[in-house]
Amino acid sequence: MKTATLLLASALALTGATAYAAVAQGDVIGTSETEIRARLESAGYTVEKIVFEDDEIEVEAFYKGAEMEIELSRATGAVLEIEAEDDDEDDD
């Protein structure tokens, strides 16, 4: 019985750890606003804006206090690029 309890506790701990993992290039997030928002929010992001362009989807979000821009393939929903926004870009 102890072994089963230990295995269950370990599985729950691992599940919790991966539920809040940041998305990475190549991850498939989705192609609809609902899918994208649900996947990112379940990973700990706060989604601010989703823009559908010709062949890409651009998502502006916050993750652990950092402003992020995530580009997705409109065809597959895969992450093409992730970059942290730099507040100093506008200070030329």
Image (cartoon, rainbow, N blue to C red):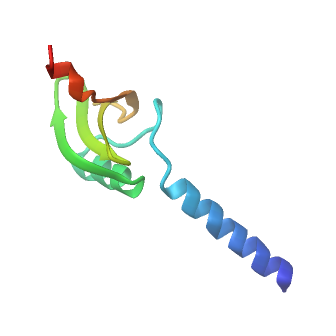
Indicate the quadrant where residue 8 lies. Answer: bottom right
| Total count of labels | 0
User: Residue 16 in the image: x percent, y percent?
Assistant: 55, 63
Which residue occupies 15% across, 19% down?
Answer: 91
Which image quadrant for residue 77?
A: top left
Residue toward you, 12 or 34: 12
Judge from the rendering whether residue 20 lies leftward or rightward of residue 76; answer left or right. right
Question: What x and y, as percent, mark residue 84?
Answer: 33, 31
Horizontal placement of 77 versus 56: left or right?
A: right
37 versus 26 height, above or below:
below
State the residue at coordinates (69%, 74%): 9
Of the pair 53 and 18, the residue shown nearer to us: 18
Instruction: Name above or below for residue 53 compared with residue 4.
Output: above
Which residue appears at 43% of the width and 39% of the height? 28
Residue 82 at x, y = what percent?
Answer: 37, 29
Question: Where, quadrant-wise, is the C terminus in this rendering?
Answer: top left
Nearer to me, 1 or 31: 1
Nearest the viewer among 44 and 40 is 44
